[in-house]
Image (cartoon, rainbow, N blue to C red):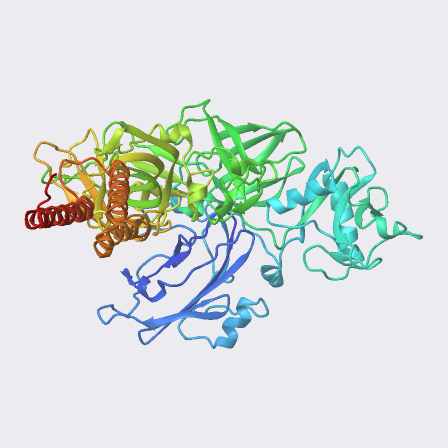
Amino acid sequence: MHSCESSLTAVSLSSVPVVYREKLKLAYNDRSISDLVENVIVPLQLRQWGHYCHSFQNGTYMLYLDGVLTAQGHLSENIDLALRLNGSLILGQEQDLLSGGFDSSQVLLGNITQVNLWNKVLPEESIEAIANCSENHFGNLFSSDNDTLELFKVKEVTVPLEDLCNIESNYLIFPGERTLSEAKSLCYHIGAFPYVPTTEKENTELFKAGLRIIRDSTNNYLFWLGATDEVEEGIWRQYRTDKKVLGVFPKGRPNGEREQNCLFMFKTTGLWEDVRCDSNRLSNVACEWNIMRELRLRGLCVDIREKTRIGALGYYNGKPFFHGHYGHMIYSVEAGVWQLQDIRNNGSIIAKLQLPSASMYPLGRHRWQLESSICGHLNGTILSLSLSACNEKEFTCDNGDCVQKSVRCDHVDDCSDQSDEVNCSMIAFDKGYRKHSPPIRRDPSTSKRYPLQVLPDIRFLRFFKINDVEKVIFIEFTLFLKWKDHRLRFWNLHNESDFNALSKEEESSIWVPSISFPNIFDGNIRILKEKIYAIKEGEHEELNINNDDSDLRYNGSVVSVHLQRHYSGSFACAFDVFRYPFDKQHCHLLIEVASVSKELVFLDIEKATATYTGNEILSSYIVEDLDISAIEEENNPCSVIKIGFSLTRRYGLVVITIFMPTIMLAITGYSTLYVRQELLQVRLVVTLTSLLVLYTLFGQTSSSLPRSAYIKMIDIWFFFCINLLFLVLIFHFYVEYIGYSRTELRNEKKNQKNPKSTI
């Protein structure tokens, strides 16, 4: 069996099978076979005929779209292949019951023709010929062209076969005097370019149409034309295609040479005239219709995306009107006043728009006044609606311009009216949001609470002072905290974090963990810089077709909030200088989430990181051995982590300034033991001087060391050296004493042997 039909969509397309959300819903003998065409996308285009052909043969299904084989497959074995002729054929209306169960929302608003049924399979050549309007084959079982049909609220029109493949017109006229740049913008807003005729016949048709439609022109310029000779003087080319255009100029024109590179059409003759492109002259414009992008009407409460599609179909009250797939119609009722009507709902007027100028069109984003209650809004409510050619990857500027969503709220004006940098709030709050309460999740079934994980990242920038006497370390560091707040919604996030920084007002409106440092010295800490920003870690929510701005929205579960703080402060460290100067100090930085229990918020030690980005070799120490650990304190319910690091003292200078002099002094004093015994004065002076210098050096060194009640290794060294010189000095005294005693004893013995006589 073969079934083919052609449909022209004016508002919606609904045939057998049903086109729903640009995908086919196909049933055979009341059994769904949509899986055979699940990957087929059917482009719905206003004012454009589409040809659909369905072929069934021995359980094999084939689909032809516009004459091209698009999908095929085998029907399921549990489907009855025999089609019983005991039903009713209804075109343009879905029936839920036999000849009944009609729904006004499921009626075709458009044109349909060439509905044919065959009991045989047509060759592909015939299908292609029917689709390109070169042949018309009538079905041998049914033909809408030959068989009698009962018509209900439809209009029957006879048109030539070739018209089904032709576009009705090449242009759409937009009355309203404007400059050339404004005319270009108007055409760009509907995804088109200013039109320029390519033949004299087209020029005559445009001229006559302009005189018929444009009635209130105040000057002699009928149309701006979409061509320029800026690249090559005298060679006029279309804006869009760059193809050459044979101009329709009066004798002696164009005459502007290199200064006049743009065109307009005279109202009196229909001939062309060249003019400066920056001219302040005003004229109307006709936009190319054959490339016009389909528009989207956003801001209403529709249920499917296709209901937002709308296009310019013709003229009403001397201006183009816009007609949607599902019955929405926008048209001009008087100068500067436009009306939105639902022609399917008893023709009710939905809203009205008053524009500042009669030459303006309702393109872009505007504030409409409701004329009837709709979408939960009462009559008289002001509702923001947008009408533009922007797709889902583009942002609609207020004036109708389309820019990429990636440039939305990037601190650069990309819309010509700068509206892409307006309403750039990044956060929306759930109802009842409390900034003083952390975002705690609960399991609805068990009421179990899940504490919030805060991921810390500490980056030490520099140790700008280490005072081992007062046991204080002065550190400059950056603290990064990362968490997720499921109660928040985020808009227009970028890949670069600099564009996602929260404003001061937003920072003060969200929950932020309160951080303290338990081992801070005398409370001496400063926040040099602070920034809070958001980073997207997942995809945005499905675009809401009813949002007039089409902004991207992200759930708080796929966005992490980052707090970045730059600190400078002093921290206590318990210096152990027993091994000075060969000591290695183990210090740490304590970070605590204050004022909230770790049962609610805790610092995740498993994912915490710590780095040192400065120079590891300091003037007196070497920084090394960074590590992170958790602190468990019975009397502290808050979450605390410890970032430990080691400071290894550089002892080279101490060896040179202390150990080498003391060794030299000790050797000098010890060497006096080898001075002749008769030179007592030399020995005593050198030893005593070395001892005094050594003691003085000991006093100076001790004053520069941390005060402690315990003896340090350098003290032991000085004690050794001082005691050594002291013993040497005592030894000299002892030797001198022994020598003197021996001399006295010898003298006494000598006197006893040789007594002197007195006369």
Number of marks present in the image shown:
0
The quarter of the rendered structure image containing the C terminus is top left
In the image: residue 627, left or right of residue 376:
left
Q: Residue at coordinates 58% horizontally, 45% vertically from top-left?
A: 312
Residue placed furthest toward the right: 252
The residue lying toward the viewer, choosing from 246 and 91, is 246
* Closer to us: 56 or 340: 340
Q: Residue at x 42, y 60 (%)?
A: 41
- Residue 245 on image: x %, y %: 78, 59
Looking at the image, which is closer to me, 105 or 519? 519
Q: x, y percentage for residue 9?
A: 51, 52
Q: Can you give x and y, in whole percent of width and height, for residue 148 in the image?
A: 47, 57
Q: Point out the image quarter for the N terminus.
A: bottom left
Q: Residue furthest top?
A: 380
Q: Residue at x 12, y 33 (%)?
A: 637
Where 731 sits versus 200, above or below?
A: above
Answer with left or right where residue 202 lies relative to residue 586: right
- Front residue of 588 and 132: 588
**Res 161 visible:** yes
Asked where in the image residue 415 lies, by quadrant, the reply is top right
Q: Is residue 116 visible?
A: no
Query: In screen coordinates, is 346 left or right of 667?
Result: right
Image coordinates of residue 226 in percent, x first then y, are 73, 51
